[in-house]
Amino acid sequence: MTSGSRCPYNNMDSNVKELIYSSGADEKLSSLLIEFTGGDVEGAKKIIEAMPKDYIAVKVRYMAHKAHCYGVLLLVVDLKHQSIENISLVANNNKAASQIDNTLKYSKFKEKITDYIRKTGNDMDTMSRLREAINVEDFSGMMFSKFKDNKFDKEQLKVVFSELFSRVLADQNCAVKIETEEVDIFSVHKSDNSYNVNKSQRLLDNEKEEDQNESQKARKEEVQIRNISLVILKIEPVVAPVMGVPALDLQPGDDILVKIIDEREIGDYLTKLLGGKENGELVPIHAAIKEISKKEDIESLMIIVEFGPGIAGKMFISPEIKVEVSGLSEEKKGERSEAFKVNFLWIIFFLIVFFFIILFFTIFVNK
């Protein structure tokens, strides 16, 4: 870096820096979360860690004794699009290459792969053949055929990878050990940013660089899209039977009162942070409606509200339930109040009429 250049991190808040480096979240989201949590880095990490896991890391150790080829393979698969997002692998004739512990957490396992490649290197020909075989379209299809009930069948995956290694390495007795782990997009993004390989591997991957850049760009765009719902909390409405608005009449943008009833650790943390709990008791808080939809298989409406950057709430309620809306204009409040008065007067009128009808009927019967 030249003396005239400036590092973009120089003027960044130290808490934001720490969150970026420790979580992999981008600067924009990190800044919002640090502001939202009042500078609580650990709290911001909890929010990110609680986000839905839409990726699975498949961690493989393989040993092909006849072919004298050993190593590990790490695939990150995107569950939403049923595709392979990222490939990292080690391949050489040293048995130690297959001893990298695949029970380690995703980030640590990838770090071990990076360190091993830096120090020892890869058999470039074998690595290239394995990559090519994995990138064949029907390989991901074979993998996802073993994905049932939101998880991979590891024994079935062994069959898929054993066949892969046997075919590429020409060794029918290849030993394979597999572990899987749910990961989030920030873990993948963080690992991608910190992952550097030796010069020879970079040269081999130059032809794929454009595709990888597009993939990283897509991941960053997805992070921005999903910022609204990093954590979804369970909530319930504050009901107002008289002056409330029927749930069916609510619209995105309406400011309603809700209570957070999420009993998870992250739920309790966020409830206190948002002011939804005082002296151990749940209290109503304001939230803006972001989405309203009706489930085809049930009568209830699904309502999603937003509390802050990446913090959403979700509830299912009957369309007829009247919800307290705090964002009504004074004019609308006046209209509702006037309508209530008019309705009340009509009720009194009909009661009086009903009373006289009963009275006249009683007199007539007694005669």
Image (cartoon, rainbow, N blue to C red):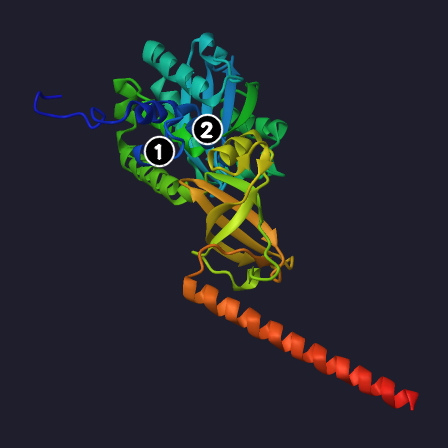
Image coordinates of residue 131 in percent, x first then y, are: 40, 29
Q: Is residue 296 left or right of residue 230?
A: right
Q: Residues within 10 Å of mark 1 (few under 14, many from 20)?
A: some
Dot 2 falls on a residue whose secondary structure is strand
Q: Is residue 348 left or right of residue 196?
A: right
Q: Which residue sits at x=35%, y=10%?
A: 120
Dot 1 falls on a residue whose secondary structure is helix
- Residue type, mark 1 in image: Glu
Task: Assess whether mark 1 and mark 2 are in contact (beta carbons under 8 angstroms).
Answer: no
Image coordinates of residue 85 in percent, x first then y, are: 42, 35
| Location of residue 168 with respect to 175 vertically, above or below | below
Q: Is residue 88 left or right of residue 82?
A: left
Image coordinates of residue 165 in percent, x first then y, are: 50, 24
Q: Quadrant of the C terminus?
A: bottom right
Q: Which residue sits at x=92%, y=87%?
A: 366
What residue is pinned by disc 1?
Answer: 35
Using the image, tell me which numbered label, if any, was put on residue 75. Answer: 2
